[in-house]
Image (cartoon, grey):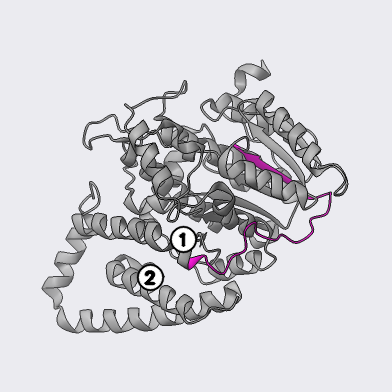
Amino acid sequence: MDDLDAPSGQIYRWALTEIRLFFSNNSSRVSVQEIYVSFKLNTERRGKEGMASSSAASGDGDREETVSLKKKKKDGLGWIEWLRGLLSVVYEVLFQRIMASHLQNPMPLPPLPDITSCIVTGSTSGIGREIARQLAESGAHVIMAVRNPKAAHELIQKWQEEWSGMGLPLNIEVMEVDLLSLDSVVKFAEAWNARSAPLHALINNAGIFSIGEPQRFSKDGYEAHMQVNHLAPALLSILLLPSLIRGSPSRIVNVNSIMHHLGFVDTEDMNFVSKKRRYTSTSGYSSSKLAQVMFSSILHKRLPAEAGISVLCVSPGIVQTGVTRDLPKIVDAAYQLVPYFIFNAQEGSRSALFAATDPQVPEYCEMLKADEWPVCAFISQDCRPTNASEEAHNVETSQKVWEKTLEMIGLPSDAVERLIQGEQVECRYGMADQQ
């Protein structure tokens, strides 16, 4: 599968074409395995044709030039890659309702036993609020991991009143966590792990997109988008592995974005401080989302099948949620003027709910792992498997993102392996609370 590096542009375009054609020709609900098999066979067939023709047309001199180009450090997306990413975003905006027209709203969920525990970050507003509520109404034990516990308790009281007479009281609790503080993340994970209770789903939903705002840094010294959207969820996911193993089969669901197609990660400057690249809120956001896909892909590979943990990223679509609270008023107003194209929070929650509850998802993730697919499972806003961006397939960069992320969040390089073996792992953060 590493052959994607050379003709990645061709294979990526063919992959998208095959996925769209397959979806348009299959209006009935089909399994993720059927979609994956069709996508894989057609991609490999087209890819081999492209590689064969490319090989025939190039001589030894071209091969040497290709090797030298590969060794040259990439400083950002090429304009063709950027344009391709922009077209992916525009496509999502214009056609997401058509692509998701087969879905019900709200999405019907299978009954979830009360012992099913689900942690949902950022669950007091937007997509996270819908995810938490629908999981609780289906019978799950939901833990709202939030920065504002008071707002969460007020929501729970409201939900309980609306749910009264429709079944047993909703099983929801609140735990405080601030993703702008890695100390807070460690404290949260330690508090949950201390229960020795199983965790069946971790839904990393919380995120920020401060459009038009100047660059901000967390108290840990990291660029705010990178910390909230990538570093904090990565730390939380790894520290909760012991609980996820107890809840096996379990899942880590990362609410990502189609905007990762516009992202580029420089592992030597994930904070955007070197001035090699001009910082904008869009570049900060898209890069953090790409970093999350890359990190998730390596985590997906490093977790052995016997651990029983599936790792996925999902795109909720283009959604009108609380994330737009940071938008300039004129841009936020524009969001309100295009309700047909923009999903509401309930519609945007469907892909994450699907990834967290559909019984076929673990098998699909294992199929990707067995085939050594370079990227973890990525579920689109229409609840069907899709391909992550071309840049996300860069295995070498993904490995560097993995290593740099572990360094930034204060974990040893063998943290995952040690936690799976039941060993204790010390994190650089949270040490003050232990002293």
Three-letter amino acid code of the residue under disc 1:
Val
In this rendering, the count of numbered labels is 2
Quarter occupied by residue 283: top left
What is the distance, in whole Å, between disc 2 and disc 1 at their CAs? 15 Å
Local secondary structure at mark 2: helix
Q: Of helix, strand and loop, which mostly describes the magenta segment?
A: loop
Residue 133 image position (x, y, % from top left): 70, 45
Residue 375 badge = 1
In the displayed structure, 382 sits above or below 42; it is above
Magenta highlight range: 99-122
Q: Earlier in the sequence, mark 2 or mark 1?
A: 2
- Depth check, mark 2 against mark 1: the one in front is 2
- Magenta stretch: includes residue 281: no
Residue that label 2 marks: 16
Residue 173 seen anywhere in this rendered image of the structure: yes
**Residue 164 drawn at (x, y percent):** 85, 42
Q: 351 or 126: which is nearer to us?
A: 126
**116 magenta-colored:** yes
**Kind of residue sitting beneath label 2:** Leu
Residue 240: quadrant of the picture: top right
